[in-house]
Every structure is written in structure tokens, then in C-alpha cells.
Image (cartoon, coloured by chain):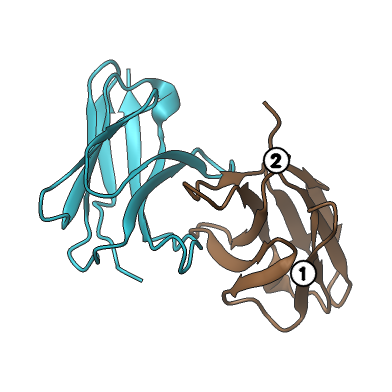
């Protein structure tokens, strides 16, 4: 499995955009980047995923660099409820789809 | 929208006892996953089932077994419980194709005393 590297923690002011980076320099051509988050002791929540193109949904945007070695999850207007641990996970659908959670980024949104 | 249901939500057992955790996936989802999250740790994959067949296996102890039934619900059976088995156990389900997004249940908190 390709490994990912994320900063252990980040802060963001409420109402501002939260930009969470992820490095996945060993990603291979058929591997996708998935983002999940876990609010304290709740089940992890799917956010978004992408292969090579940028993606947007009602929760967030995902920007993937052209060489696919890194990506950024963008929460456009962070709220206090976005305080959580965010996980960037690389998987190869069709081969294995288990989620290997790394240490993630603990995002603290403050008033 | 229907979500993943897990029961029980809390379970207290003594060492060497047996526990059974149940998971009811989102309707029409064909894959079920089990994860274990110890105190202060990240979730760890245990095992998964696709169309009632085991599809992948992680670091699941031999004391644990799981299966998926004809109605797609799944059960995780844990025997000879140890103090270190105290954890949150999450079940997730997905419709494997085309997107493989996993939707997690609220978890079962198992405490072994």
C-alpha cells in the first residue's frame, strides 16, 4: 500500500478555508486518494476521493497535483463541527479496498 | 437515509468470556468491513466480506472470527477475551463498485474487565 504523510495537527479560524495537505509520493497509476474524517469517537466519515482530476462535492474540494504525489483537501468555510481527525488514504479499488488509517491530521477549528 | 447499524452499542465482558458484535449494512451494500480502534489509536482493519465471502484479512487475532449471512448482516465473534481487546469496533459497508466509499456505523464499545 502506498504510504501517506500528513501534518499531525492544524488550526483554522471558523469561517475560513481549511487546507489539509497530504503527501503520497509512491502512489501508483491505478490508486485513488480518499479522504475520511473522524469526529471524536464517532465512526469515520467519508468525505471525497479522486484519481487525477480535482473533485468537489457538498463537503469539500480535493486538489491533486499533476504528478499525483500530493493532494490538498479544502474545507471552504470551516465550522466548529469540522473539528476532527482527517485521514488521507490511498487505495487500489478492485485489488484491495481496506482502509489503512495513518495518524491523520487533527484539525482544530476555533471561534 | 438508512445508515449502518451496530449492536450492541456498549458491551462489558470479563476476561476469557465471549462476545458477539453485530452489523447491519446499508441496504443493497454488498461489502462489510470490520475495524478495531484501541484507546488513543487509529482504526485498524480486521476483516472484510464481499457477497458473503471473506475478501480481505488484516491483523485479526485467531481468537476472533467473523461471517456475513445471507441477509448481508455480519457478526464478529470474539472468544477468550483479553484486557487488550477493549476497544471501539466499527463496522462499515460499501457498494463495492463503482466508488468503494465506505460508510461507518456508530461503533460498539467493548470493555473487558
In this picture, residue B2 sits left or right of residue A32: right
Quadrant of the frame with the N terminus of chain B: top right
| A8 on left or right of B68 | left
| Residue A42 to residue A92: above or below | above
Give the residue pinned by disc 1: B66
Q: Could you say whether the residue bearing mark 2 is in a helix, strand or loop?
A: loop
Q: Which mark is residue B31?
A: none
Q: Nearer the viewer, residue A39 or B51?
A: B51
Question: Looking at the image, which residue is at 32% across and 22% down?
Answer: A78
- Badge 2 crowding class, 10 Å Cα cut-off, few under 14, some 14 to 19, many 20 or more, is many
Q: Position of residue A71 (x, y in %)?
A: 20, 47
The mark that comes first in sequence, 2 or 1, is 2
Q: Which residue is mark 2?
A: B26
Mark 1 crowdedness (10 Å alpha carbons): few <14, some 14-19, many ≥20:
many
Left/right placement of residue B71 relative to residue A109 reads: right
Apparent side of residue A66 relative to residue B61 in the rendered image (left or right)? left
- Residue A90 position, x and y percent, is 34, 59
Whether residue B113 is visible to the viewer of this picture, yes or no, is no
The mark closer to the camera, 2 or 1, is: 2
* Name of the residue lying farthest toward the left: A66
Task: Verify CB contact (< 8 Å) between mark 2 and mark 1.
Answer: no
Chain ID, cyan in image = A
Rendering coords of residue B109 (x, y %): 72, 52
Give me the residue at 33% from left, 38% from top.
A107
- Chain letter for the residue marked with disc 2 in the picture: B
Please provide percent x and percent y for residue B89.
Answer: 67, 56
Amino acid at each position: 500500500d502506498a504510504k501517506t504523510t500528513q501534518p499531525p495537527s492544524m488550526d483554522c479560524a471558523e469561517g475560513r478555508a481549511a487546507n489539509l495537505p497530504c503527501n503520497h509520493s509512491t502512489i501508483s497509476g491505478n490508486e485513488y486518494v480518499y479522504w475520511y474524517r473522524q469526529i471524536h469517537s464517532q465512526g469515520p466519515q467519508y468525505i471525497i476521493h479522486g484519481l487525477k482530476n480535482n473533485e468537489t462535492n457538498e463537503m469539500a474540494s480535493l486538489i491533486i497535483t499533476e504528478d499525483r504525489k500530493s493532494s490538498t483537501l479544502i474545507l471552504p468555510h470551516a465550522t466548529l463541527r469540522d473539528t476532527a481527525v482527517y485521514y488521507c488514504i490511498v487505495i487500489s479499488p478492485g485489488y484491495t479496498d481496506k482502509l489503512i488509517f495513518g495518524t491523520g491530521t487533527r484539525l482544530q477549528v476555533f471561534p | 437515509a438508512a445508515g449502518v447499524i451496530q449492536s450492541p452499542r456498549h458491551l462489558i465482558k470479563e476476561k476469557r468470556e465471549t462476545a458477539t458484535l453485530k452489523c447491519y449494512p446499508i441496504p443493497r451494500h454488498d461489502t462489510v468491513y470490520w475495524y478495531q480502534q484501541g484507546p488513543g489509536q487509529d482504526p485498524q482493519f480486521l476483516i472484510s466480506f464481499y457477497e458473503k465471502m471473506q475478501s480481505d484479512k488484516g491483523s485479526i487475532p485467531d481468537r476472533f472470527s467473523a461471517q456475513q449471512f445471507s441477509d448481508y448482516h455480519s457478526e464478529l465473534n470474539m472468544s477468550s477475551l483479553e484486557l487488550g481487546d477493549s476497544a471501539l469496533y466499527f463496522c462499515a459497508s460499501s457498494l463495492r463498485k463503482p466508488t468503494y466509499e465506505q460508510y461507518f456505523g456508530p461503533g460498539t464499545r467493548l470493555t473487558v474487565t
